[in-house]
Image: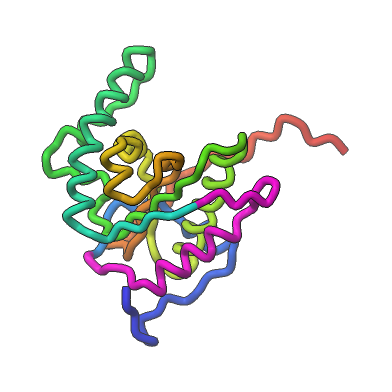
Amino acid sequence: MNLTTNEKPQKKNVFEAILARRSVRTYAPDQLDCNTVQTLLEAAVRAPTAMHEEPWAFVVVQDHALLQRLSDLAKPIFVEEVRHRNSQGASHSFDHFTRPDFNIFHGADTLIIICAKPSSPFVAADCWLAAENLMLAASAIGLGSCVIGSAVAALSIHKVKTELGIPDEYSAIAPIVVGVPSGETLATSRKDPKVLLWKK
């Protein structure tokens, strides 16, 4: 993304960014520039972290051919996972994953993978907190984002980790695509907060 001064979206305050955040699944072909990606990473590392461990490390993929290969590799693995879960009583359908033209990254040109060493019980939580910071920062500057959980199994394969520069001792925890939304993504409804106890 290389926006001129006149094109820059108005920045949102934190609550506006929370309300504006969507899981965006259609993206314009604009590639994010290095400064924009760096801004998102800087937001990510300001997340809360247990015992100040800061376990996160990042892989940024903006190579279209590599993203396509990763999508093609991940789809059948994820479909098999879904079939297994459905055989255990789940009832989710992901038939669109079997279509040759379906890309799990939804046409976004930037994939950011948050990785970490599994060194403490709180590492995954820390990484997901970093992911939320990153996605809210993206929302605040007018970008879209989406967690791509269907990619995790493929990103755990040794040859994939090697190609992406992920050391053996690290795990891919939170894959997120970010980009310029193509069109508007409508808000989905949310249930009211379920309060189990409010004791005064």
Relative to 51, is 154 above or below?
above
Residue 45: x, y in percent?
Answer: 56, 59
Residue drawn at point x = 54 percent, y = 57 percent = 133
Residue 158: x, y in percent?
Answer: 31, 37
Residue drawn at point x = 45 percent, y = 50 percent = 114
Which is more toward the observer, 38 or 97? 38
Q: In which quadrant of the rendered image does the C terminus lie?
A: top right
Q: Quadrant of residue 43?
A: bottom right
Residue at the limit of the structure toward the right, as seen here? 200
Residue at the limit of the structure toward the left, as seen here? 100
Q: In which quadrant of the rendered image does the N terminus lie?
A: bottom left
Residue drawn at point x = 67 percent, y = 46 percent = 50
Which is more toward the observer, 158 or 37? 158
Q: Is residue 52 magenta?
A: yes
Q: Is residue 56 left or right of residue 1?
A: right
Relative to 136, is 77 above or below?
above
Residue 116: x, y in percent?
Answer: 49, 45
Residue 39: x, y in percent?
Answer: 47, 69
Q: Quadrant of residue 77?
A: top left
Q: Is residue 192 left or right of residue 3?
A: right
Q: Is residue 71 left or right of residue 99?
A: right
Q: Which residues are magenta?
A: 29-56
Residue at the limit of the structure toward the top, as seen here? 88
Q: Is residue 42 magenta?
A: yes
Query: Could you tell me how many numbered marks the image carries?
Result: 0
Residue drawn at point x = 41 percent, y = 74 percent = 35
